[in-house]
Amino acid sequence: MTFISHTANGLTSDIHYQFDFERFLEHLVDVILRFTADTDAPSLWLPAWIPGSYLIREFARNITAVHYEILDKELSDNQIVNNKNPKRYRAQKTDKHTWQLPQAKSGQTLKVYYEVYCYDLSVRTAYVDQQRLYGNFTSLALAIDGQEQSSVKASLMVPEAFFMNKNKEHVLLACGLKATQLQSDERDLYSVQADSYHELIDYPFEIAIQEKFDFIIQDSQHQTLSHRFFLTGKHNADMGRLQQDITQICQTYLNWLGDAPFDDYTFMTYASGQDYGGLEHINSTSLITPRRDLPATNESAMPSGDYQRFLGLCSHEYFHAWWVKTVRPDVMLEVDLRREAFTPLLWIFEGFTSYIDDFMLQASGVIDKASYLKLLAEQINRYYQTPGRAQQSVAESSFDAWIKLYRNDENTGNAGISYYNKGALVALCLDLTLLEKSAGRYRLFDVVKTFYQQAKQNDNERIGISSADMGTVIGQFMLLADWEEFERCYVNGIEELPLEALLEANGIQLYSNSKETADKHVPWGMRCTETPAGLKVNRVTRGSAAAKAGLSAHDVIIAIDGIKADNKQLALFNEASHDIECHLFRRDELMTVNVVPKVNTDDNHGSDKVFPHSISLRLARTNTKDKDKINGLKVESTWLDVMKDA
């Protein structure tokens, strides 16, 4: 399903894209698209979003004008010989991402010209400069309306100027598609082919100075799967350590799932200063990470917290090959990339993945159980520190991804919850509930594997699932009534997750950190940044002392009780029982408010239970003869011993 070899099979492509990087210093790509129209006045369109990132990103905004030529088939060769240029027309835009070619007729061969501005460092778009040529075809390649299923060829033309001051042997192409390379004195030409436009856009590429290692993974039938890892950007990573850990993680997934929906896999990673993110693709992933997250040359046997974060990112995107690219929400099976695809199921795909990604770090042995529990505690702390969990269900959060997840503002934490964060914890609760209801026989991993096995039965080896499908499969492992109650309370409802009870039943104790309190980290219920001008308010929790006094996000507090405002001054009056006078600027207007720090708040959202600001998790002591030990203590760890029967 992955590497395409049309040339070897003698097939030709009806549609040809040529991407010329001659103007890389200006962050511009010049594109020529050649095709034969199958209708009069054909239309071209560009996706508005990229699969895996649920926000309308308006990629078309980076395209300038679109022009086209009509090539007379009988004269096209003579035109070249006689230097006769066909007339060039300007395409007409019909909506924000669609261009029409009104002069063209069915059966005519057309050449379309346009430029794309590429200077977005994220993994979702395209970035071109003198150091790297990176792109997603969703940002670069106009689709031909009605011809999206035709085979396509794409040529990447890299001018010799790009290789200046570089060791050309170290300039590599990273891409999940096989490529041919032709070299000349003026440019290097890389060519790839795909069965369709929709397949082409699932293969990002990068041309840059890159370090690379290869490794092999085996499936349950002892078939070998080739993997490649590319790393570009300035870094001092220990590549040997990285290869060892990534290999262990990937092999653990194959041990669990048996086989893979790909024949080979490519990791593409760019090391930056602060940027972080990843995007899944059909047989590859594109990652961007702070260089400090990569393994140091003196990395300890137990990975540092920063390195664990990078390994978790790799694990997350790798699992998506099964659990998003193969098994996916039903509305994403045949999706129109020009408009939103609403679904309440993103918590299943991103939430399950956000639970399993870190879990697999300890299942593979790359980190120990204590380190995993620390990662899990961080998820729980984010959940407890988000009051919006009492306002929005995880299903609603999924449905609203298009308008909320990627558009955080000062009210986000008050009004909603992330389907990544809560989804991961719902997945944890479902895993532990399945263990309980099935007397330890089944768990979440069985649910995932069942869906994957179903997908493999389809001709295209993919499957789209609905909420009803979830019930059908989970009903194989516990009573359907139990699942429906779980779904009512924790998926469609906003009841507090039974984290403490479920973890305790599985040998994990939850401890509240008495030193890391809400009063310490969110004084008066507000989050501030200390600046030379004063304390800038970033967020205010609903019902808090700050909110009831009238303090708001973006205010700059300049004085507290008559003294210049800073974090120390705020801490002095954090628990005062009398009114505190504050002077502040809102925009350019001076204001005065009185804060009562000990005002009664509704931080617990109507619940009698007080939720801690910060918790830690520890394996409980036991008197059994369990062989697993942490720090010399015997522990219960059945829940953490996944895949023991794999």
Image (tube, grey):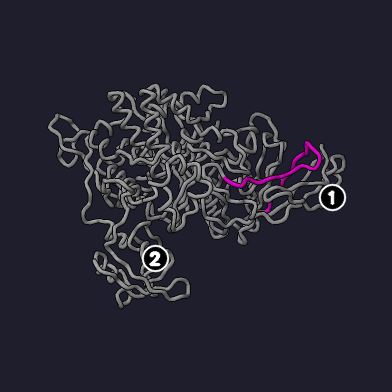
Kind of residue at disc 1 = Pro
Q: Position of residue 555 (x, y in %)?
A: 42, 68
Asked if residue 56 is positioned above or below residue 561 in the image, the reply reads above
Residue 110 appears anywhere in the view: yes
Which residues are the magenta region?
30-49
Badge 2 is on which residue? 550
Q: Secondary structure at mark 2?
A: loop
Asked if residue 628 is positioned above or below residue 122 in the image, the reply reads above
Position of the N terminus, as image quadrant, is top right
- The local crowd at label 2, few if under 14, some if 14 to 19, many if 20 or more residues have their Cα within 10 Å, is few
Residue furthest left as drawn: 623
Does residue 47 belong to the magenta stretch? yes
Q: Position of residue 141 (x, y in %)?
A: 65, 46
Numbered badge on residue 132: none
Query: Residue at position x 34%, y 59% from top?
Result: 544
- The local crowd at label 1, few if under 14, some if 14 to 19, many if 20 or more residues have their Cα within 10 Å, is some
* Residue 134 vs residue 61, the one in the foreground: 61
Badge 1 is on which residue? 86
Label 1 to label 2: alpha-carbon separation: 68 Å
